[in-house]
Amino acid sequence: MRKKKRWKKAGAALLTLSLLIGNVQGLLTQAEECPAIVLEEQITEQCESDQDETEQILTETETKPETEKQSESQTEPETEKQSEAGRENRETDLTETESESESGNRTEETTESEKMESESESEKNTELESDMESESESESESESESESETEDLYGIAACAAGALTPSGKPIARAAGWSAVTEANRVSPNFLPVKFYPGISSLEIFNTSSQVVVGTTSNGRKYLYPKTTGQGGKFGAIYHKVLYSNYRWYDLRMTVTNYTSKIHYDGGGTMESYPFILMIPSAIEWRFIQSLGGLVMKCEFLDSVTGAVSQVNTRLQWWDVDSAQRFGLKTGDGSVAGKYYYSGSRLYVESGATMAGVKNLEVLTGPGEESETVDPKYCAAYELQNCSTYYMAIGPRDHINDDDYSYARSHIKDYNDRLKNGTAATIDSSQTLKQTDTSLTIIDTPAPEKMVSSDGSNWGTENSVASVSDAYWYQIRQFVPWQSSNAYYQSFSIEDQLPQGTEYVGNVHVIREEDGKNMTGNFAIELTNGRLKVTAGSGMPGNKELYGYHFLIRFQMRMVPSAMTPQYSGNTAFYSTQNKAVTIYQHKTGGAAVEKWSNEVTTRGSVNRVEQAAPEKYLDGVPGKTEKSLVLREDEILFCVRQNLPENGVAFLPQTVTMTDQLASCLELLETKVELQRAGSGFSAAGNAQIQNQDGQLTVQVPLTAEDNGGILQIQMRCRIRKGMDLSPWKQTTADGSVWIRIPNKADVTLQWNNGAPQSVSKSTNQAQANLRINHIRLTKKIQVDDIVWAHGNPVFTFTLTGTDAAGAKQSWHQAVEFTKNQVPEKGTTTLTADFVVPAGVYEASEEKTMRYQLEQITQIQNGTQQGARVRFDLNTGGDGSAVFSNQKTTDTEESHTALVRNKIGK
């Protein structure tokens, strides 16, 4: 009778479906004119109406005579009645079993090596359904008859299941949900987790001996608790599956709660534990709906530090149908948005409880199972500043109803095989995917422009050490994940290079997440100062473009001559601004879209290089600051040298002016002005203006840009004026030497085209011409008693002849005269003739004098006696001296004669 009753339910379901099909087909013709939500409401209302009508028909059909009813009732076994009573209490039983599920904390992690492989979309429910059907047949009273009959019943039950309304309400009616189509754009600021081949990995962890880590037929690992109380001890970590703000994040998923009992077909509950299988090459889970449900705590971890971290993420759930129920609630942060694809088949149940966890929002689908990736069975959550959320995976909707339950033997067999680690066929079990594939177009964000002075440290502003130094531009563009029908038709990034700059080169396109050089996948061209990087042929349709950040880097340089700086003091400031633009068009149509980047600024400055102090030197020899004159008539060549600083076009000296106050004892003979430009020798500055007024020499030279970095040289040829009293310049040294020292300095002023102060003056060092006063002192010594005053005053004459250092012949005469008032009363007396001579070699002698003759020459300094003469060599400096002593002769008839100093020159 139980079979007949189930046949009646199945018949009613089939009749309901038949009525539904007829009415829904009529409604579908209005689909193009009706919004999705309105159409959904109409279909739902029609379904409810049709179900009422069907129940009425069934009631009339099943009306029988009372005796027939009693007869049929008496044939039912007592056990069947007990089963019916058990079904009435199944919800109470399930609540009790769910309360047994416990939460725990994960204490350590066990890494399992996972085989990375792609998951075929065709691995769905086919294998499982055949398993369930064959296993449920083992409960039949007669194996040969029941096998066929039970298989038919499961087929009909599947049809009947479609007639029951899913829990909750259609998603189109649920609060907070929005419908989207391919024409919509959603924010790129919420990033889905993505399995990056070659970067991401899966790590299984388990710290409990009561949790089985089993292996499927293709080597994948699954986790199965053998008893209650293991929550928090097992799960998995997907490493590096979200890349945001230059950081990688992991997704740790810990099973915290799970059911321990499940309703089975026939009216009761039995022990059963859910397993979870994480796919090692995708963010995807496998489970079996008939074994129970579980809840996982999902946390985002900083991949480097392991710290729980808040992110903005988009959870995109695909393949939610009657085979599973999916629940979600956040641990922190907020739900910024929820959306579904227009025409969605999903239902939403708010405030639901799964595996003991309350206040979940649960999604489920209608009776049919989706065998393809159909957007009508997908939904998306946008979580803002969220580090933790809870994900629940439960059995199919209405599992507590016999027509949605599974055979006891089916449930027991799977639990036994999972417990023993031999569940080889669970690879093709129910699937739930958290994927990067989008329901609609993800809006492409604007590019991010950055600049760097060294290619390593990036920002929106930079300063170059030298205004002509190369620097780097970087354009960072995130290309969102898109479904293939929303791929780009064209995609390019362009940069109009700023005026006053030049492109240096070295364009590289790098994919940031894996560091792959993608330059060869893009066409790069520079036309009229516009750099264009275009996705190459086939690239817009290549998945390698989507879900990654791309870095375009190249070098630039400012060209100061093509820019106008701003001045402050003696500093010229240069700056240039730049933006980039991403231009793309989706293959779904529509006009091309431009997204402009932020603006970056590069700054450089030039400080005006002031002139160094000019140099004063002698005889055209830089560094020579003193010169000794041999003769008073010798020429003196004073030189001034001014290096003109190299400043570029920012600062150019307009004029250079030299002023030189010559000593009044000097006579200016000639002024010569020369310029030396870069790469050439000195040449006359033909436009120099020279003025000499009372010994103040002024030389002014206009300059051009070509003179930048050149050298100005001014030569002044002078000599000591004849007859000039040199006593103001006379100096006596500690050793008694006497010098004539003639110093000279100059001032040089540069007048600038820009900057402040506009003119700068600097003084030269001092150069000096020295004329040494050499002395040859000849002393006459006589006895006082030898003087006969009646004969007159004694007079003696010295002669000095020789050749000076210049090779000129020289001759001097000088006499000394003794007078009575100068001579002491007794002893000896002396008088000295002082000859001032240039350096040279000279001979000193004494002229013959009446009544005296030369007795001896003594006290010779810097000389040698040669008979009655003394030879003095003054080329090496120093003075000469000698004492000529005389004695009285008998020449009494002669008288003294007074003489004066005399010089005879050749």
Image: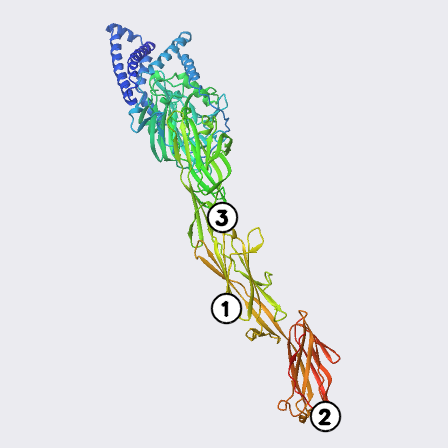
Q: Which residue does the image show at 67% across and 94% down from the upper left?
A: 790
N-term-proximal mark, 1 vs 2: 1
Return the mark for residue 694: 1
Q: Count residues near mark 2 (Cα–Cα under 10 Å), then give few for <14, some for 14-19, many for 20+.
A: few
Return the mark for residue 466: 3
**Image quarter for residue 333?**
top left
Instruction: Report helix, strand or loop for mark 2.
Output: loop
N-term-proximal mark, 3 vs 1: 3
Q: Residue furthest front?
A: 906
Residue under numbered circle 2: 893
Callout in the foreground (3, 1): 1
Return the mark for residue 866: none
Residues 291 and 848: in front is: 848
Can residue 294 be seen at all in this image of the molecule? Answer: no
Residues 853 and 635: in front is: 635
N-term-proximal mark, 3 vs 2: 3
Q: Is residue 578 above or below residue 873?
A: above
Q: Amino acid at mark 3?
A: Ser
Q: Which residue does the image show at 71% across and 80% down from the upper left?
A: 845
Left or right? Give the position of 882 relative to 583.
right
